[in-house]
Image: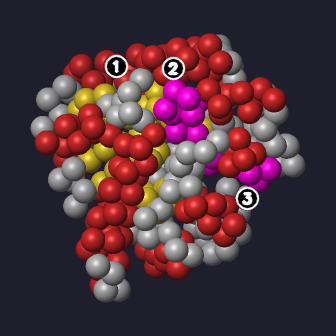
């Protein structure tokens, strides 16, 4: 089974509790992801105001980046930092994990264009414009929910598109989502968002939003956070979100974005990313073709990354 996952918060857990990426408790480590034939992962730099009050958010992001570089050096036999789809394909040929960097919440960059440029030079290839708080760029789904992109936000997304970075709309306000669509021309990326029609939560996407993602050849990663799936969720609940998006015409536009190490509760029967085999096998039992599952678990996200992230 191949996997390209759009979101984890494992670097934050390394920052908070110590240890490295190869063998640790939690939802994701490199030892147990060796079971995947090809494996690529977006590792988010993330923190909020409660993470470490003695440090600013940009300082914490810088510390997490140092952890990322340290772990790349320690585990160079099995992981490498990738910036493009071509580099991820080469990592797969070498049997290595393709590690991509993202930033969850532009406040970790002070919502500043120069810090965005610095992040790009360090290899960041995706940025969530907001986390759960309103910032200088936009409202979020939870705070400032009626606020779309500010003028600074519009400039920020234009710069991201020009640099070949994925503009991540997960956590964004609904008006902010539509402003991203109107301000840009490339694929829309929702790294870890489910279907609002299947389970109502402002973190999930409406059918109209997902249809817009389809129209732009973008992708959304199915989030395994139980709170965004439904009441007492299990594998069938996860499948309900996937099949709903497929029914809207999105067979090439759904991926996995598990929110590993960023969620308090997973569906019944899941303890970490390695349990995605349960989902794969359940979809096979429903007579979905393996070609569709390969797209879901790997190639749909790979296509978008290869299209957008070229340098």
Residue 307 numbered tag: none
Q: Which residues are magenta?
A: 160-178
Badge 1 or badge 2: first in the primary sequence:
1
Label 3 crowding class (10 Å Cα cut-off): few <14, some 14-19, many 20+?
A: many
Crowding at label 2, few (<14), some or many (≥20) Cα neighbours within 10 Å? many
Label 1: state its secondary structure.
helix
Nearer the observer: mark 3 or 2; the answer is 2
Q: Which residue is mark 2?
A: 119
Left or right side of 70 for 110: right
| Distance Cα–Cα, label 1 vs label 2 | 14 Å
Residues at marks 3 and 1 touching, judged by CB atoms closer than 8 Å? no
User: What is the C-alpha distance between the residues marked 3 and 1?
Assistant: 34 Å
What is the secondary structure assignment of the residue under circle 2?
helix
Horizontally, residue 138 falls left or right of residue 74, namely right
Front-most of 85 and 82?
85
Residue found at the very far front of the displayed protein: 185
- For image coordinates 31% across by 28% down, the residue present is 81
Q: N-terminal of the two: label 3 or label 1?
A: 1
Tell me residue 36's x, y (percent): 21, 53
Q: Which residue is mark 1?
A: 69
Query: Where is residue 238 drawn, in percent x and y?
Result: 48, 71
């Amino acid at each position: 089974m191949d996997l390209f996952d759009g979101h984890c918060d494992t670097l934050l857990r390394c920052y908070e509790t110590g240890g490295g990426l190869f063998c640790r408790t939690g939802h994701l480590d490199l030892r147990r992801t060796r079971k995947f034939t090809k494996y690529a992962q977006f590792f988010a730099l993330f923190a909020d105001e409660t993470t470490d009050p003695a440090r600013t958010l940009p300082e914490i992001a810088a510390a997490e980046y140092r952890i990322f570089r340290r772990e790349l050096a320690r585990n160079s036999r099995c992981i490498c930092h990738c910036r493009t789809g071509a580099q991820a394909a080469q990592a797969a040929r070498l049997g290595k994990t393709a590690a991509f960097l993202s930033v969850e919440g532009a406040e970790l960059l002070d919502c500043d264009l120069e810090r965005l440029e610095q992040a790009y030079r360090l290899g960041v290839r995706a940025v969530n414009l907001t986390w759960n708080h309103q910032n200088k760029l936009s409202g979020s789904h939870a705070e400032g929910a009626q606020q779309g992109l500010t003028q600074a936000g519009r400039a920020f997304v234009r710069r991201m598109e020009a640099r070949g970075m994925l503009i991540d709309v997960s956590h964004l306000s609904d008006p902010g989502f539509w402003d991203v669509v109107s301000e840009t021309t490339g694929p829309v990326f929702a790294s870890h968002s489910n279907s609002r029609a299947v389970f109502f939560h402002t973190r999930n996407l409406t059918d109209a939003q997902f249809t817009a993602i389809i129209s732009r050849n973008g992708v959304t990663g199915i989030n395994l956070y139980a709170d965004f799936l439904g009441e007492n969720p299990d594998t069938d609940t996860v499948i309900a979100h996937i099949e709903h998006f497929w029914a809207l015409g999105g067979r090439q536009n759904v991926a996995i974005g598990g929110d590993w190490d960023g969620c308090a509760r997973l569906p019944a029967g899941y303890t970490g990313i390695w349990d995605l085999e349960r989902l794969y096998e359940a979809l096979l039992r429903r007579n979905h073709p393996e070609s569709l599952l390969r797209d879901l678990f790997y190639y749909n996200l790979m296509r978008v990354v290869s299209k957008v992230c070229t340098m």
